[in-house]
Structures are given as C-alpha cells and as structure tokens.
Amino acid sequence: MSNENENEDGTPENPLRKELPEEVPAAVEEPEPQSAEESGVPSLSGRQRLVDGLWPPRVSRAQLIVAVLLFGLGFGLAVQVASNSDGDSALRGARQEDLVRILDELDSRTQRLEDEKQGLEDQRTELENSSDQAEEARKQTVEKEKQLGILAGTVAAQGPGITLTIDDAKGTVKADMLLDAVQELRAAGAEAIQVNGVRVVAGTYLADSGSGVKVDGNKITQPYRFKVIGKPQDLEPALNIPGGVVQTLEKEQATVTVDRSTKIVVDALRPAERPDYARSSSR
C-alpha cells in the first residue's frame, strides 16, 4: 500500500518541509561605483573625450601613401589647368575675325607643306618613269640648284609678295623686334627676304647699333623696309595677328604699313662661302 506522504520519486515526504519557506539565494551586493572625485581621476567633458579620440591621429603607412599620391595628383591637375589658362589667355580676348584669320593662316601653312610633299613625290615619279633617267636627274639638279641659290641668297629672285615698311621716328624699335618680323615671315612661307639692301638668309643675325640696327654686320637705319617674296594672302595676315608683329611695333609708336604686290624683286646678293669644315657625305 503506497504512502500518501511519499513524493513522486518514492522518497518519504518530510511533514516539516511544508512549513518552511523555499530557499532563496542570497543576493550578492555589488560595490557602488565611485565618483570621479573619490577615484582620484578627473572627469572629462564630451568635447574633451572627442578630442582625445581624434588627436593624435592614428595613421597607418598605407593611408599615408594614399594621401601623398592624392596630393601629387591634385598638384599636377592644378598646374595643368594653370598652364592651359595661360596659353588660352592670349586668344581669349581676340575678336572673331582675328580668330578666323589665325585659323586661315594655319590652314595655309598646312597646305604649303602638303604641296611641298606632293612636289617631292612628283619628282620621284618622274625619275622612276622617265626613259632617260640621267637627263631627268640633271634637269632636276639644275632646278634644285636654283632653289638652293635663292635660299642661300647667292642668286636674285622675283615673284609675288609684300613690302613691309617700319617708320621708327622715335628710335624705339630694337633688333629683337625686327628679328620677330623675320621669323614670322619665314613661318608664313616667305621664300626670299631683303631688308634695306641686305639679303636675309638662314644664318642672318641682327644686333642693336646706336640709333639703328646691324644686319649681318651691316648697319641699317629707319625706315626699315622688308621686301618679301611669298604668297601675299599668307604673309600679310601673319603680321597682323592679335599680339603679333604689327601690334607690337605700334605699341612702340612706330608706323607700320604692309603693301601687297604681284612682283617683288629681291636682288641683294651674298657671296657663296665655302664651309671650313663641313664636306658632302655623298659619294
């Protein structure tokens, strides 16, 4: 017979157990947090904690390399933008017709180079197809000798071109300004140039000399007169571009005139000089 006072697992139930309350684990008292004054550590405000977290910065080596590369890239872009701005400033204030004239001049220079290329190709074709190649070569040699003589200033030349006259009453025009005019004319396709009776060639130099200018040691005085053979439609616009030769001379209060002509005669000659050291390498 089972005992009613037995537990479910068969152990006898203690009658006193019912009278005792259930055991409750003792609570462990945690120490109260100490204030900043009691701990001896000064309290920090929120801003101070933020500054302590950000400074000093903790930068890794990879971050430092990336920063240096980005700085170099930014500096290069800034220099490039500045150089482009300087190059464009000369044309930024130009009028539309001046810009059109500059473009036409560039097109003309390109066309001259194309014509020269085509002429050389035609000469090569004639040599290849001629039945008497020796005679054809002789003719071309004579023609080339004339062309070289014009460039060297040893033979006279005539053809269409312009006359550039510079009246410098105040004596403010210097040799470097005249040299700029020569260089601009050459770039525009001038084939023969003469200044006040002196032939201008590849080795010509200009220097200031008192109230005048020396060209290859020959003193010339104003008015300076350039006789130039070439295409007038290319030569005149080249001198009148914005900021070019004419504007520069007019700023010096010189009077500049450019006249086109269908026939310009360049008859000032230079003696043929034999080089001291250079010799032909052809056999």
Image (spheres, grey):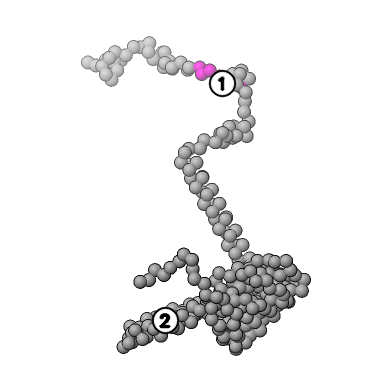
In the foreground, 156 or 6:
156
According to the picture, the residue beneath numbered tag 1 turns out to be 33
**Residue that lies at the very extreme toward the right in this rendered image:** 170
State the image coordinates of residue 157 (x, y, percent, origin top left): 55, 83
| Label 2: element kind | helix
* 2 vs 1, front mark: 2
Q: Amino acid at mark 1?
A: Pro
Residue 186 visible in image: no
The one nearer the camera, 146 or 275, is: 275
Residue that appears at 38% across and 11% down? 16
Q: Quadrant of residue 140?
A: bottom left
Going by the image, does 25 lie left or right of 1?
right
Towards the viewer: 28 or 252: 252
Dominant secondary structure of the residues highlighted in magenta in the image: loop
Is 39 one of the magenta-colored residues?
Answer: no
Segment tinted magenta in the rendering: 29-36
Horizontal and vertical percent for residue 130?
Answer: 33, 87
**Which quarter shows the N terminus?**
top left
User: Which residue is located at x 49 percent, y 47 percent?
Assistant: 69
Q: Is residue 58 visible?
A: yes
Outermost residue toward the left in this view: 1
